[in-house]
């Protein structure tokens, strides 16, 4: 039950950061969108490949393909609101992260898998939090430097603008609390939670001549 709850919070953090550029697409700079897409693609591919490599160590090719596909898709989606360069950046980062994560997960000994998952999870969510802070800073700067003409054109969309200016997507505190809760849950993981789900495949015997 504990791994499922931790995975739920991790997916929630990723979805939170992926939805953000769609809400503030007109406020995020192109460089910020590229960094966001690259970070999401790399972290998703790395974490997915490492976890699947630990759980399914005998299916290295399948794990590598799945992690590359998942990382490239989410990285491309995160860069979609910004620019085609950000989409390409997220795509390539997801592919590279998926390959490295799969290699890392397969090579880790079973008795050290929990430590690696805890360390890697902490690094990933910390990087995502700093990316989130970067996005918030870019949004605030664009609001302060927006011309007066844009403010006049935004008057008919006051309700929509207020909806976007929610505390949930403009304050780092909710994201920080969510990441802190995820780190606490991850620290409670044990070796039994990461036991490989598949045993070594049986080798086919060659017929005697």
Image (cartoon, helix red, strand yellow):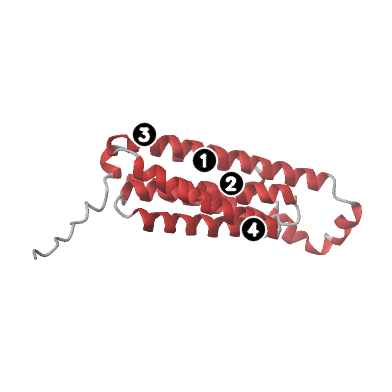
- Image x and y of residue 184, in percent: 42, 35
Which of disc 1 and disc 3 is earlier in sequence? 3
Which of disc 1 and disc 2 is earlier in sequence? 2
- Crowding at dot 4, Cα within 10 Å, few <14 / some 14-19 / many 20+, comes out as many
Residue 10 visible in the picture: no
Mark closer to the observer (2, 1): 2
- Image x and y of residue 64, in percent: 42, 54
Which secondary structure, mark 2? helix
- Crowding at dot 1, Cα within 10 Å, few <14 / some 14-19 / many 20+, comes out as many
Q: Residue at x 43, y 50 (%)?
A: 48
Q: Is residue 45 left or right of residue 145?
A: left
Which secondary structure, mark 4? helix
Which of disc 4 and disc 2 is earlier in sequence? 2
- Crowding at dot 3, Cα within 10 Å, few <14 / some 14-19 / many 20+, comes out as some
Q: Residue at x 52, y 54 (%)?
A: 95
Which of disc 4 and disc 1 is earlier in sequence? 4
Query: In the figure, residue 103 lies in which quadrant?
Result: top left
Mark closer to the observer (3, 1): 3
The residue pinned by badge 3 equals 115
Using the numbered discs, state the Cα–Cα distance from disc 1 to disc 4 in whole angstroms: 21 Å
The residue pinned by badge 4 equals 87
The residue pinned by badge 2 equals 39
Using the numbered discs, state the Cα–Cα distance from disc 3 to disc 1 in whole angstroms: 16 Å
- Crowding at dot 2, Cα within 10 Å, few <14 / some 14-19 / many 20+, comes out as many
Q: Is residue 194 left or right of residue 47?
A: left
Using the numbered discs, state the Cα–Cα distance from disc 3 to disc 2 in whole angstroms: 23 Å
The residue pinned by badge 1 equals 125
Which of disc 4 and disc 3 is earlier in sequence? 4
Using the numbered discs, state the Cα–Cα distance from disc 2 to disc 4 in whole angstroms: 12 Å
Q: Residue at x 28, y 39 (%)?
A: 110
Mark closer to the observer (1, 4): 4
């Amino acid at each position: 039950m504990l791994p499922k709850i931790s995975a739920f919070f991790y997916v929630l953090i990723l979805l939170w950061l992926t939805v953000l550029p769609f809400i503030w697409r007109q406020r995020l700079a192109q460089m910020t969108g590229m960094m966001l897409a690259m970070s999401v693609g790399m972290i998703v591919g790395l974490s997915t490949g490492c976890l699947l490599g630990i759980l399914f160590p005998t299916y290295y090719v399948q794990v590598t393909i799945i992690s590359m596909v998942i990382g490239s898709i989410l990285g491309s989606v995160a860069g979609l609101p910004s620019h085609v360069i950000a989409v390409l950046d997220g795509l390539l980062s997801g592919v590279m992260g998926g390959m490295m994560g799969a290699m890392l997960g397969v090579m880790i000994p079973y008795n050290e898998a929990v430590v690696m998952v805890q360390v890697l999870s902490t690094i990933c969510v910390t990087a995502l939090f700093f990316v989130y802070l970067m996005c918030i800073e870019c949004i605030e700067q664009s609001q302060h430097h927006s011309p007066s003409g844009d403010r006049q054109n935004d008057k008919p969309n006051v309700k929509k603008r207020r909806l976007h200016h929610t505390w949930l997507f403009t304050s780092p505190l909710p994201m920080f609390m969510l990441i802190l809760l995820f780190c606490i849950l991850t620290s409670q993981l044990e070796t039994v939670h990461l036991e490989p789900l598949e045993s070594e495949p049986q080798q086919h015997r060659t017929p005697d001549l």
